[in-house]
Amino acid sequence: MSDRSGKQTARLWVSWLLVAALLGYGVVQTAITAAKLFAG
Protein backbone atom coordinates (compact mmCIF):
# COMPACT_ATOMS: atom_id res chain seq x y z
CA MET A 1 0.00 0.00 0.00
CA SER A 2 1.39 3.40 -0.98
CA ASP A 3 1.80 6.29 1.44
CA ARG A 4 -0.83 8.37 -0.37
CA SER A 5 -3.60 5.77 -0.05
CA GLY A 6 -2.69 5.36 3.62
CA LYS A 7 -3.20 9.06 4.20
CA GLN A 8 -6.51 8.96 2.34
CA THR A 9 -7.65 6.08 4.55
CA ALA A 10 -6.67 8.00 7.68
CA ARG A 11 -8.56 11.06 6.47
CA LEU A 12 -11.61 8.88 5.77
CA TRP A 13 -11.48 7.48 9.31
CA VAL A 14 -11.14 10.98 10.79
CA SER A 15 -14.12 12.30 8.84
CA TRP A 16 -16.26 9.29 9.81
CA LEU A 17 -15.29 9.70 13.47
CA LEU A 18 -16.29 13.36 13.27
CA VAL A 19 -19.66 12.46 11.75
CA ALA A 20 -20.22 9.75 14.37
CA ALA A 21 -19.29 12.15 17.18
CA LEU A 22 -21.68 14.82 15.91
CA LEU A 23 -24.50 12.30 15.47
CA GLY A 24 -23.86 10.85 18.92
CA TYR A 25 -23.82 14.34 20.44
CA GLY A 26 -27.14 15.18 18.78
CA VAL A 27 -28.69 11.93 20.03
CA VAL A 28 -27.45 12.58 23.58
CA GLN A 29 -28.78 16.14 23.56
CA THR A 30 -32.14 14.92 22.27
CA ALA A 31 -32.27 12.22 24.96
CA ILE A 32 -31.44 14.75 27.70
CA THR A 33 -34.10 17.16 26.45
CA ALA A 34 -36.69 14.37 26.29
CA ALA A 35 -35.74 13.21 29.78
CA LYS A 36 -36.17 16.76 31.11
CA LEU A 37 -39.57 17.06 29.43
CA PHE A 38 -40.79 13.74 30.81
CA ALA A 39 -39.34 14.43 34.24
CA GLY A 40 -40.75 17.93 34.36
Image (cartoon, rainbow, N blue to C red):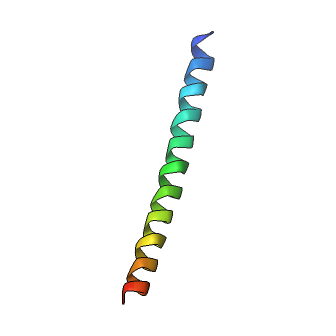
**Which residue is the extreme one toward the top?**
1
Q: Position of residue 25 (x, y in %)?
A: 45, 60
Q: Nearer the viewer, residue 11 or 16?
A: 16
Looking at the image, which residue is at 47% across and 51% down? 21
Q: Position of residue 24 (x, y in %)?
A: 49, 56
Q: Answer with left or right where residue 24 lies relative to residue 36.
A: right
Count every numbered label the image shows and give the total: 0
Q: Nearer the viewer, residue 4 or 22?
A: 22
**In the figure, 19 relative to 5: above or below?**
below
Q: Position of residue 12 (x, y in %)?
A: 59, 34
Query: Quick one: quadrant of the C terminus?
Result: bottom left
**Which residue is the extreme one toward the front?**
39
Looking at the image, which residue is at 37% across and 85% down? 39
**In the figure, 27 relative to 21: above or below?**
below
Looking at the image, which residue is at 57% across and 13% down? 3
Q: Position of residue 11 (x, y in %)?
A: 55, 32
Query: Quick one: quadrant of the N terminus?
Result: top right
Q: Answer with left or right where residue 19 lies relative to residue 29.
A: right
